[in-house]
Every structure is written in C-alpha cells, then in structure tokens.
Amino acid sequence: MGSPADEVNITDAIMEVDGCLFPADIISREGLAYTKNFPVREDDVFNVTYPKSGTTWMQEILSLIMNDVDISKVESVPNWNRAPWLELATAPGYLDGRESPRLATTHVYATFAPTQIMQGKGKVVYVYRNPKDTLISFYHFHNMAKFLSTPESFESFVSDFMNEKLSFGSWFEHIKTWMDVRDKANIIFIAYEDLRKDLAGSVTRIATFLGKKLDAEKLKALVDHCSFSSMKNNNMVNYSEVPRTYFDRGQKFMRKGTVGDWKTMFTVAMNEEFDAFVREKMKGYELDDGWTSDTK
Ligand code: PPS
C-alpha cells in the first residue's frame, strides 16, 4: 500500500466501482480515472499485484534492477515515492514529471489499468502468491491498516475472500483479468514462492525481461539487500515511517515473509473446502499446476 503524504480522517469506508470494492479513504474515482488514462511511456515498468502478494519486495527488486543496483539511491527514498501506486492521489505528483524510466505500482485489475498497457506499451511484472498465504497476510493487514475494516473473525474473512467482498476486489478476478491480457501486454508472471526459492534466478529472469544484465557482484548485492531480514529493518520499505493514522504500529508490515503460513490458521476442513473452491474457480487459468499446492 502507498502512503499518502498528509494525514486524513480514516473511516474504513468502501467504494464500489464496476463491481470491485476499494478502500475509499485512499482511493477515489479521480485516482481510478488517472490510472486508466495514464499516458504510458515505452520504457515505463509496472509492478502489478493483488495486495499482499509481494508488492513491496518487487518494488525493491525493480528499483535496483532499473538503477543498475545503486543501493545508495534506494536508501534515502521510500518505496511509495520510488514506485508509486497509480491509483493513489499522490501519483501525479510523483510520476507526471519524472524522468524515464519510471516505475509504478498498482493493485488494480487489468480492466482498471492504463489502457495503453494493453496496446503493448511499457512492461508489466505481475507477482502472484499462493492464495492461502495471500489471504493470511491480508487478514493480518486488515488488523493493522486503519483504512481496511477489522475482520469480525478469521472464518468471516475467509468467506469474504472467497466471495470477493474484500477491498481491491477478488484474488481470482485479479489474476484472471491479467492473464486475459497476456497476449496484448508485455507481461511476465513471477511467483512469490519462486522468489523465496531462488531469488537470484528470479531476479535474473526479471532483469532479462527488462533488457538488463547484472554481473555476479551486482546480483549478489541486490539479493542481500532484498532478503527478508534486510528489508524488515529497512525504514524505506518497512512502513515504520507511516503516520499512525494509517497503520497500527502494534503490528509489523514485514510480518513473517514465509511460504505456507496458512497452515497455522486453516483447519483441515477449511483447507479442503478452500482448495476445491480454488480449483473450480481457476479452471482454464492454470498458470502453473500449483494454485492449491503447498508451494503455490
Ligand atoms: S501490500 O500491502 O499489498 O503492499 O503488501 P505486499 O508487499 O504485497 O505483501 C506483504 C507481504 O510480503 C512479505 N515480504 C517479503 N517476504 C519475503 N521476503 C521479502 N524480502 C519480503 N518483503 C515483504 C511481507 O512480510 C508480507 O507477507 P507476510 O506473510 O504477511 O509476512
């Protein structure tokens, strides 16, 4: 999530636009119009995610790939400035006059994204994560972010996730809309779990997609800087600088950063029901064979 610069009155209100829910405290119709009509430059890079899928991690990875792994450059500028969310009110201030190549972030479905992306302009790095781990991370985030409603219970949150009643819409719809445009947009799909398994290999794949080559020394510097332990203590990405109005500091944004944390909260029955639901819902969208496996 981005950090709007000024403090505002937070109400956790929801806005529905074209069947998708948005947190009205931080997203407006103007922001969505700006996003849709964003004039895309050929060398723009978009970090696209459903919330809690690895957005912040990819912001750091892309910032470094794009600046030739100059770590000093990312150490003084927060992620929400370096890779601003298109749909937030602060985006024009960051992006409109910015030198190329620009990096932007978005949580929106492809149907809300800049039209010019679907005309082949810019490059999209789409990060996805095992839906159960995404759900768990989003659940904890709902208890932290004041612009999202506090869940009544874990069970009710699982039901809202399955029934597409969460802010930023449905995990299922999100992936499907972006997979639907894969032949029109310049897009690469990267799994959070693959970043965990082989960060260096995944970074090399992303760099190649962006037309960059990192030597072994730079690759190692990037991988070290982007480890969970390093990012957890990095105030430019861990949201410790965000005003209390937005986040309850009792909770940490950089929570666990692991694969399989869903096992700590799903019962066997919930897991079976959820997996069957995901299999049914994602029919025809088998990006890999693991939507419901332990690893994805
Ligand atoms: S947001 O609010 O949508 O921008 O959140 P997002 O950044 O997409 O997701 C937050 C989760 O990503 C984890 N994270 C990482 N995991 C591994 N390595 C690194 N470097 C890393 N950086 C962030 C973060 O801990 C959240 O996951 P959970 O499971 O809650 O720990």
Image (cartoon, rainbow, N blue to C red):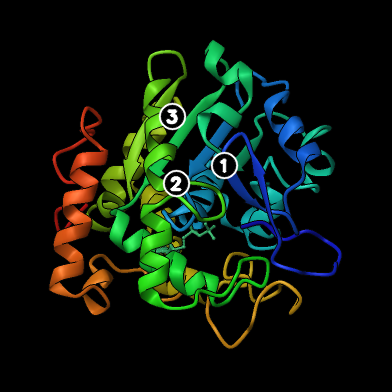
What residue is pinned by disc 3?
177
Residues 123 and 134: in front is: 134
Circle 1 Cα neighbour tier, 10 Å, few/some/many (<14 / 14–19 / ≥20): some
Q: Give the answer, above or below, for where 184 lies relative to 82.
A: above
Amino acid identity at mark 1: Cys
Q: Quadrant of the N terminus?
A: bottom right
Identified at 64% across, 62% down, the residue is 75
Residue in the image at 36% along x and 46% along y = 128
Real-space CA distance between mark 3 and mark 1, rounded to the nearest whole angstrom: 12 Å
Q: Is residue 231 above or below residue 65?
A: below
Q: Which residue is mark 1?
A: 20
Mark 3 lies on a secondary structure that is: helix
Q: Position of residue 9 (x, y in %)?
A: 84, 69
Name which residue type carries label 3: Thr
- 150 vs 161, left or right, is right
Q: Is residue 92 left or right of residue 249?
A: right
- Labels 3 and 1: the sequence-earlier one: 1
State the image coordinates of residue 55 (x, y, percent, origin top left): 49, 52
Q: Please report the residue visible at 42 percent of the width from the left and 67 percent of the height from the top.
A: 157
Splitting the image into 4 quarters, where does residue 154 fall?
A: bottom left
Element under disc 1: strand
Residue 217: x and y in percent read: 38, 50
Counting from the top left corner in percent of width and height, residue 233 is at: 52, 77
Marks 2 and 1 in Cβ contact (< 8 Å): yes
User: Tag 3: Cα neighbours inside 10 Å, few (<14), some, or many (≥20)?
Assistant: some
Between 57 and 143, which is closer to the camera in this rendering?
A: 143
Residue 223 shows in the view: yes
Q: Specify whether residue 214 is in view.
A: no
- For residue 12, what is the image quadrant? bottom right
Q: Which mark is residue 170?
A: 2
The residue under label 2 is which amino acid type?
Ser
Closer to the eye: label 2 or 3: 2
